[in-house]
Amino acid sequence: MSAVPNMPFYSQTPMEPAAALAPVLDEDLEASSSPEPSPKPQHTTRSSYNSTFYKSSISASSSASSSPRISGSTTRGLAKPVRAFFPSGTAPDGTPLYSLRTFNPVLDGSDSSCNSSTTTLNDGNIVYQIMGVPPVPAQSPRRSSELLPAPIPNKQGGQTYRWLRWNFGSVYRRIFTLAFLCNLATLLALGIQHALGRRFLTYNDCATAVAANLLAAMVIRNEHLVNMLFSVFVVSTERLPLRLRLLLAKVYSYGGIHSGCGVAATFWYIAYLVLLTQQLDTTPNPIVRGFVFLVSYSIVFCLATILFFAHPTMRVKVHNWFEGIHRFVGWTTIALFWVQVLGLASDEATVNDVSVGSACAKSSAFWMVIFITLLIIYPWGRLRLRDVEVEPMSKHVAKINFNYKNVQFGQAIRLADQPLHETHAFAVIPNPAAADAEKGEGGADGLLSNAGKKGFSVLVSHAGDWTRKIIDNPPKQLYTRGVPQYGVLRVAGMFKPCIVVATGSGIGPCLSLFVQRPNHPVRIVWSTKKPAETYGQNIIDLLKKTDPNALIIDTHKTGRPDLVGDVWRIWEESHRADGGKNACEAVVMISNQKVTRKVIYGLESRGIPAYGAIFDS
């Protein structure tokens, strides 16, 4: 069934109060000159609004007793399927409800053997049959077909403009480009001055630039700095004007600094290697020359390898290789850089007749490498083996409980089953307040288990070998690395109301918001396969309590949804209801890389501010 709060929004003629069986017919279907296949009975399916009905011009029969006719049509034009809205009651808030049904023509007009679930409409020698649509229980979650049956607007601008604005020109890539171009401009300016003889660029200058960029790339990844950025730009700005909040919410794109400085460091090191090679050509000692070349070209090879596997395409295809190379080859690079810096300091000490320690103390690169090394060691120094309790929710999902600290919504923790093996980031769900347990909203084996206790939990779904191992063979202990770190979901707290969209286990991060801020106004869209069987009824109950009109899509029954269309219609509903007093301010999405990019792009290119995780930082 569908609520139609504002008929002029998609029709030329407003719907009048109809009698019990007076339908509103769709002119587009019978006006077409090309034959159409007989559609299946409509059971509140997605395509009934998206593909056809929203384009129609609608008119109502003036008399409930006469056969419905369509203005401007002939009898012969009716010999094809048509669709109609039938009144089917009212919603609790008084909004009229209508069911969409399909009429199938019987050309000979002689078939009158209709069962009790079939209605016929006669027009000349043509009989139209309509299969009855079973009523939808009031308790069932809202369906896509109950949203405004309106067309989503076209994307803004041309394809080139959209690519430059929301693809290549994303905030993440703007930050990346700014970091890289600033370094490139500096290198070119110094190179020009070197060529003109005004200021000579030395390999020590390049080594300092390499160390500075590597330091910036490491600092921006530190958990405490990231949490500080979110505290400054997100947590403390929730009362600022909307336009400013929409801009500050992109703080999660900070990864552009990491990648931009990493690429710039490689270019600076190439310049360093060119200058070093020119100077070492005059060195009489071939052993020293060979050693320096070996270390220097090894560093270039390591940096190039890291960049190659860090490219978004390679990260997707060989993610485990990317993680291993980024870690172990990165450590190797820093070790080689230590050798390089100490070698340069030794050479400087020999030339200036000072001690090696004194030369190191005067070297900027030396101090930067110290900080880089400490930043690498720090999170691993906080590697801890924690006791865990695993609650199986289904054969596809498990809930892991931790009791060593409290957390905030929007944070994530890194987990591993072995110290130096792959680590996986999972969004945390704070344990609910004790009041929730007293109200009977949770149980020992439900989502709200451990209410009132110290700790948090994470949802783990089957998404690979590691997660399958955790679900099939629940561990007693897991390693945690570093401290909980804020992520993109934290920006949802900046907007009231906010549309929260999730697919599959992406609902896990969203639950942290619903549990810790139960009164925060949100609209929920969740698409997953068999939600009740996979995640449990408790999660569905929590979503419906948070948003009574939550759109929960069971993809096992409906197939892959049109999330862009569904979210856009919810957005439009919120801006049309009550004069837009409770209009949604933004959309936050948690899903996999492919779906997130598609939906975020589809919404932003239609003027809706949307935020989703960055995968190539």
Image: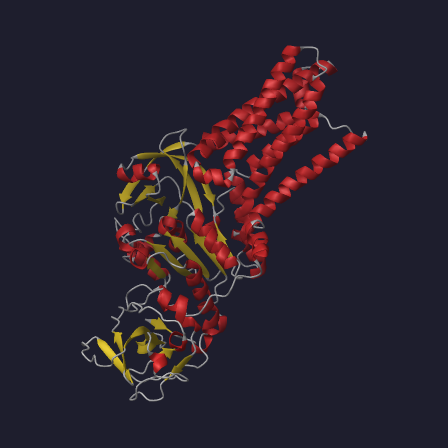
In-front residue for pair 171/27: 27
| Relative to 180, residue 55 above or below | below
> Does residue 306 appear in the picture of this structure?
yes
Q: Residue at x 50, y 62 (%)?
A: 585
In-front residue for pair 293/511: 293
The answer to which quarter of the image holds residue 126 is bottom left
Mark count? 0
Query: Residue 480 appears at what percent x and percent y?
Result: 40, 35
Q: Would residue 18 be found to the left or right of residue 247 on screen? A: left
| Relative to 142, residue 235 above or below | above
Q: Quadrant of the N terminus?
A: bottom left
In-front residue for pair 431/85: 85
Query: Residue 471 appears at what percent x and percent y?
Result: 29, 40
Q: Residue at x 59, y 56 (%)?
A: 161
| Relative to 416, residue 536 above or below | below
> Does residue 522 appear in the picture of this structure?
no
Query: Residue 277 appears at what percent x and percent y?
Result: 68, 21
Q: Residue at x 45, y 51 (%)?
A: 596
| Relative to 589, residue 211 above or below | above
Q: Would residue 174 be found to the left or right of residue 121 on screen? A: right
- Which color scheme did the rendering employ for the protein? secondary structure
The answer to which quarter of the image holds residue 372 is top right
Q: Would residue 483 be found to the left or right of residue 508 on screen? A: right
Query: Residue 556 appears at what percent x and percent y?
Result: 29, 55
